[in-house]
Amino acid sequence: RRWGPTRQTMMLLRWLCVVVACGVCQGLIAPPPSGVSRDALVMQAKGGSGFAAKAAPRRKKAATSDASGLTAEAGWVELVDLDRSALTAGGPSQAVGRSITGKPYLVRRSPQGTVAATGVDCGRCEYPLLNAHKDEVIECGMCGSRYDPATGEARADSGSGNPVVGGLLRGKPQKNIPAYPIKELADGRIFVNIDALRL
């Protein structure tokens, strides 16, 4: 048996090339007009108001004095997906953004009002810690592992967790979860650093 494209496949590809070439020659498939930016073409494809000779320049947000040093080069990223109105003292945590591992940051506000960001997975069983905050600790609902929300350091196991598999999972070693430096600005924006704190 011969490997490679069949005769029918080659004929189909030839006809496709002929159709595209004829369409371009006849003006049915027009190349983009010169002088029109890619942004304007995308705007028209999305149902925008039509072509523009140039895309409007993007305005940069006015930098506030307290945001100095929070640059991407220094590893700082603004958490734009964060619902700041739902980030209440002692309230539920939110999984937002993406760390360099591809997983979201788990952000919560402590009862004292400080904001903390940690990894989203348990250090023992890798179960998501989305609803795992109990008072001053993060407690895994699956294995019962406990962590300090500010540093990600493992604390003494609570012995709680899932009654069926919690006992089996407690045999695994409990590791710290990553905690990330976080800064809240006076205007309410929150930045997190991609480099985890070192214990």
Image (spheres, helix red, strand yellow):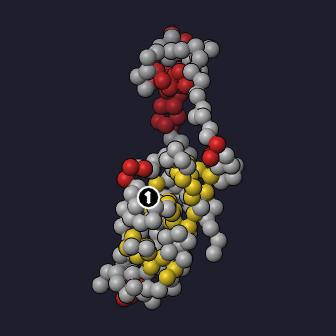
Q: In x, y percent, where is residue 101?
A: 56, 61
Judge whether 1 appears above or below 11 on screen. Answer: below
Judge whether 128 appears above or below 82 on screen. Answer: below
Name the one closer to the observer, 186 or 34. 186
The answer to whether any part of residue 186 appears in the image is yes
Name the one closer to the observer, 185 or 38. 185
Q: In x, y percent, where is residue 39?
A: 55, 25
Judge whether 67 appears above or below 128 on screen. Answer: above
Q: Is residue 61 left or right of residue 148?
A: right
Q: Residue furthest left?
A: 163
Occupied quadrant, residue 199 = bottom right
Name the one closer to the observer, 158 or 1. 158
Q: Residue at x 46, y 61 (%)?
A: 113
Q: In x, y percent, where is residue 7?
A: 50, 37
Name the one closer to the observer, 31 or 122. 122
Bin the neighbour count of mark 1 within 10 Å (Cα to Cα): few under 14, some 14-19, many 20 and up: many
Q: In x, y percent, where is residue 81?
A: 45, 48
The answer to whether any part of residue 128 appears in the image is no
Identified by mark 1, the residue type is: Ala
Q: Is residue 47 left or right of residue 59?
A: left
Question: How many marks are shown on the rendered structure?
Answer: 1
Q: Secondary structure at mark 1?
A: strand
Q: Residue at x 57, y 58 (%)?
A: 182
Q: Residue at x 38, y 49 (%)?
A: 85
Judge whether 25 appears above or below 88 on screen. Answer: above
Q: Which residue is mark 1?
A: 95
Q: Residue at x 62, y 46 (%)?
A: 67
Q: Residue furthest top?
A: 26
